[in-house]
Amino acid sequence: MVFSTTVFLYLFLPLVLILYYISPTKFKNVIILLSGLLFYSWGEPVYVVVMILSTMIDYCAGLIMNKFEGRKLPRRICLIVSICMNVGLLAIFKYSGFIFENINAVFGTNIDISQMYIFGLDYLPMDLLPIGISFFTFQSMSYTIDLYLGNVKVQKNPITFAAFVTLFPQIVAGPIVRYNDIAAELESRSITLDLIYDGIIKFVIGLSKKVLIANSIGSLWTAVKATDFGQLSMLGAWLGILAFTFQIYFDFSGYSDMAVGLGKIMGFNFPKNFDYPYMSKSISEFWRRWHITLGAWFRSYIYIPLGGNRRGKWRTVFNLAVVWVITGIWHGASWNFVLWGSLYGVVIICERLFLKKLLDKLPAAIDCIYTMLLVILGWVLFDTPDLPSAGAYISAMFGGTGILADDAALYQLTNYGLMFIICIIGCTDLPQRAVKALRNKLAPVVNYAGVLVITAMLLLSTAYLVDATYNPFLYFNF
């Protein structure tokens, strides 16, 4: 899929955009639909069936809901069917391996899902994960839920609805664009030179974040993760997990920026997905800034329907616990993710009950250290293969191996020192503030220089992609 993404961006994307711009308005959604299917099937030729099935389920559910307007029971049945079918697709393709693995462990059975096929069809094996399934199923479900709640109008045009689901800039890794976010733009949108210019800038910045920063620092984490955690030095363990901390931010926020930029180029305004989360002063604030669209989805469709914070303290605690267990499960099918989400839930509940009042009394620097320490420890759970490995890694971080530093760690510190500095500065708003300050004083010069910088970033990113063999997109796995 990495190769397909690169090929699509540099080979097919210009052709798609040219065709999109010269097509009459009534055909633009057709171009979106066909390009989205091409983009997805290029890397997942088999599992495009799953995406089409999810789309058809929610489109038909919407039509039936509209037919029974004013009748609560049939509309509720349609909503339940839509949710169960989409969650069922997730359960089958994303969680069946985890479920049967635990069944085998508990009951001593030997069920092998690699030999099982959905609906008995040999070309839909259950042991492989369709790329981006958690994103496009949630996106598609947002339509039926909002339609049931009366927040949107029914979409009767199947091409328009399918274009919404298959909108290729964000189809495999977000941001999660709800139907309500772009319902008006799906029907009519204006494409201006200013919007295209802003989109190009956003896209190139995102591409550079992903290719030049995330890939560069991520290679350190790959090297550290391949070592024996029981022999890892304390310095090496911290360098490795800090590398992943920066890698996942620049990888995911970079892809989100690319998606938002491409959306602008095509006349859409996608929601923001990141707001400098590593500058947060609490875990609650961190999750308001990280993967904003996922948080908004859970808040709108799970937390608030459960009662939110309107039913007393302990019901709020229960609602938060449910949301954060589901958040962990959404990210992956393993006990690491369940524990990862649950621990965040515990911390956020504590902040809600009493901890935030204590944090507000402390210096901001202490609050930031507290937040980042918990986030970094959380990333250990997130990207180690199992709980024993996570425990061994955290032990190494705090000197459990008895090795404070070794030659490998010192070499890595020297080799990646400059990249760490770039990452630290890049994940704050300092660059943005500096550009804004310079623009206020030297607007023409900054604008011309900006064009040169963006061009250089695009050329460097292209050169890197042509030559590189290491180019993972981390959130494609979700």
Image (cartoon, helix red, strand yellow):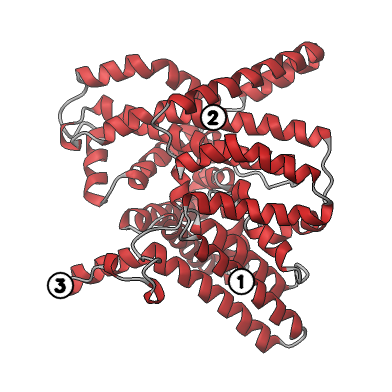
Q: What residue type is labelled 3?
A: Gly
Badge 1 marks a residue whose secondary structure is helix
Q: Which amino acid does label 2 sit on?
A: Lys
Label 3 sits on residue: 108
Crowding near pointer 2: few (<14 within 10 Å), some, many (20+)? many
Name the residue at 44% across, 20% down.
419
Residues marked 2 and 1 touching at CB (< 8 Å): no
- Residue 64 is situated, as x and y percent measured from the top left of the image, at 69, 82
Give the side of residue 312 with respect to residue 373, left or right: right
Name the residue at 22% across, 71% down.
111
Label 2 sits on residue: 209
Q: Quadrant of residue 261?
A: top right
Query: Rounded to the nearest whole Å, what is the CA distance between mark 3 and mark 1?
Result: 39 Å
Query: Rounded to the nearest whole Å, what is the CA distance between mark 2 and mark 3?
Result: 47 Å
Which of pointers 2 and 1 lies earlier in the amino acid sequence?
1
Residue 298 appearing in the image = no
Give the side of residue 401 with respect to residue 22, left or right: left
Q: How many marks?
A: 3
Query: Rounded to the nearest whole Å, what is the CA distance between mark 2 and mark 1?
Result: 35 Å
Residue 239 appearing in the image = yes
- Residue 451 is situated, as x and y percent measured from the top left of the image, at 71, 19
Label 1 sits on residue: 56
